[in-house]
Structures are given as structure tokens and as C-alpha cells.
Image (cartoon, rainbow, N blue to C red):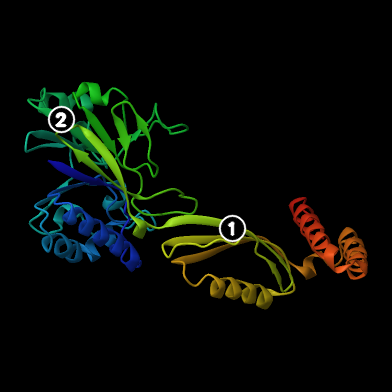
Amino acid sequence: MKIALISDLHVAASLPWTQQVWEAFLSRVEEENISLVVVGGDLFDSLDDAYTLRQWLAHSVDKTRISRLLWIVGNHDLTNPTTGKQVYRLADMNFGEKVEVCLTPDLWVEDGIEIMGYPFPLVRTEEEREAFSPSKLLSRFPSPEQRRIAVAHVGLASWVPHMSEEAEVIPKTFATMFQCERVFLGHIHQRLEDGVYRTLGSARVWRKGESGEHGYLVYDTETHTERFENLPEGRVFQEKEVFVFYDQVEDREEKPFSSHTWLHFDLYGVVQNDAQKEKIKDHLRQKYTNVAEITFDEEGLFLSSVLANHPVWQIFLSKWEKHYEASPEEEKSLWLLAREIFVKDFLQQGGRG
């Protein structure tokens, strides 16, 4: 048997393309005749999204030949991280007959393999805390009678650098305690590997800077191996620095980007006014119409009025213009590069007048 494992899709009702990532995943799983899907948490970006899209999720699974979906819930599935307001409970929602929601640690047996689910421990009482205690769970989950794997939406403190010791962190001995031959972890938006531990990584780009491929794992229960499958629909994050000088845009290293690219521009330089800034952004949007999404960072972009009275800026600009106009055509590109280097260094040094 093969199991498809995916995590951290962060499907949002306000972002229809994230729903397409999930549907593309189900299509690929069905093509491979995989009947069991396990979600390692954060299927939705918030509890409100889960409520809004509950019927959509049920329909998306029901229309496939997938027989079962085990959803090990994550912190975003259980909360509204942005607002903090909790109007609904995931436990009260219906996601269809094929979807089984794991809200507390549980164990399933599927065609000769045991699957242990360990969701995000959103605990409010001591009783709830005990339900997630690995030492307490040992009495509930005795030694496996066949091969056992675990899927959890938690971190591993001794593995991931700089991770704090929080309630959602399981001990490094987790796999040994429960005799798991593999432990697949959600929550961490990158793919890592250490012994029997694997992180599933994020199925789609969720935040700025999440580079690399996004997709899911296929675990073969017979060979005890897994392989990564890329989901292009999950997008790829690409970042470009672009120098701006008034209405001039220096967009170097032009290369093609796929239609699934999230292209982020770091703009730096000088513009005359806000209208000119918006015009430049529109120019870049029109130039890269094929990409899925374009965003901008404008922290390094300054209005010329802010710099006008700075003596160093006045001296540089007057001298540079004279040299540039007097230089032969073949040397003008060097003067343009010199201007870019000066402006970047000047702004980084805080020369704002």
C-alpha cells in the first residue's frame, strides 16, 4: 500500500489558488491509485477558513476514488491566529464521510500498518494536557503488532535550531518510545531529515522567503521508503533586486519565470514622487504578466525631496551628471553602474538628509 502525506497547505477562502493546490494534489494522488491520504496539519490557514470551506473540502474528497483522509490537525486548523476570535469549534464541523479529523492522539490500522496521529496540542485544562503526554500515551498505545509510523503536527526541539521548548514540541525519543519506524512531521515549512524523522515541508508557499520545491511525500508500506512529489501549483518564491533612479529601472539578470512563480521585488534607489513609484511598479507588473503573483518591498526606495538638501548628495549628483554627459557612448554603462553603487551605499549608510 502507498500513503500520500501532505502538510501545511494553509488553504484560505480569500485565496482561491490555494484551493487549486489541494485539488491538484488530489488529482495526482488519484492518478497513482493511492486510496489513503494523511494530512500532517494546517490544512486550512485558520479555523474560520475551515468553517467556510468545510463543504468544499468534503466535495473535493468525495468526488475522488480516495477511500479515506486522515487529518491530523495543526495549530492553524484550530485557531484564528490573526484575530484570535474563536466562534466555532473544529470538533463540531462535518467534512464528509471520508474525512476523519484527529483532534487528540489516536491510532489506526490500515492494511498491515499502524498509523499513530499526534495533532497540535491545543490544551486548556490539565486533563487535555495529559491526553497529549507521551508518557501517558504509552499505556494507550502498546507495542505495535506490525509496522508503525507516526504523523504529527509538532516540532522537534533538539533537531531544529533556535526552536524554543514549547508545549507543541515532542521529545527526540518519541520514535523510540512508541516504536515508530518513521515519524513524519508537519508544522515546519521546510523538508528536513534526521534518522527516522522526516518533515513534510509546506505544500505551498505561505510566506515571503519560502524557497525550494513544494509538494508531498508518497510512503510505500512494503518497501518502507518515501519519495517526494513536487506540486507546481504550490508555487515557487523568487526574489529580485531592482535599482530605480527616477523613471529609470535597472532590471538585470532577466530570466524566464514559470506561471507558478511568486515574484518579489526588492526596490531600492530614488524616485521623484509616489506617482512615479507606482508607475515603476506598474511597469514591472506588465513586464512579468505570466507569473502568478508579484509583491514589492519599498524600504530601500526614497523620495528625492528627502535627499535634496544633503550636501553629499548634491555634490555627487552635479559631478556625476557632468561626467556622464561628457563620456563616450561605450563608457556610459560604467557610469550608470557607478551611480547605482553610490546610491545604494549612500542610502544604506543612512544618508537621508
As displayed, is residue 295 above or below residue 222?
below
For the residues marked 1 and 2, what is the alpha-carbon distance in whole angstroms?
45 Å
As displayed, is residue 121 above or below residue 259?
above
Callout 1: SS: strand
The disc placed on residue 148 is 2
In the image, what residue type sits under mark 1? Lys
Rendering coords of residue 174 (x, y %): 26, 26
* Mark found first going from the N terminus, 1 or 2: 2
Residue drawn at x 38%, y 58% as measured from the top left: 83
Left or right placement of residue 283 versus residue 41 in this view? right
Q: Decide which of 254, 340 is in the foreground and name it.
A: 254
Rendering coords of residue 269 (x, y %): 72, 62
Q: Which residue is mark 1?
A: 240
Would you identify the image quadrant in which residue 111 lies? top left
Extreme residue in the front direction: 330
Q: Decide which of 169, 32 is in the foreground and name it.
A: 32
Rendering coords of residue 128 (x, y %): 20, 37
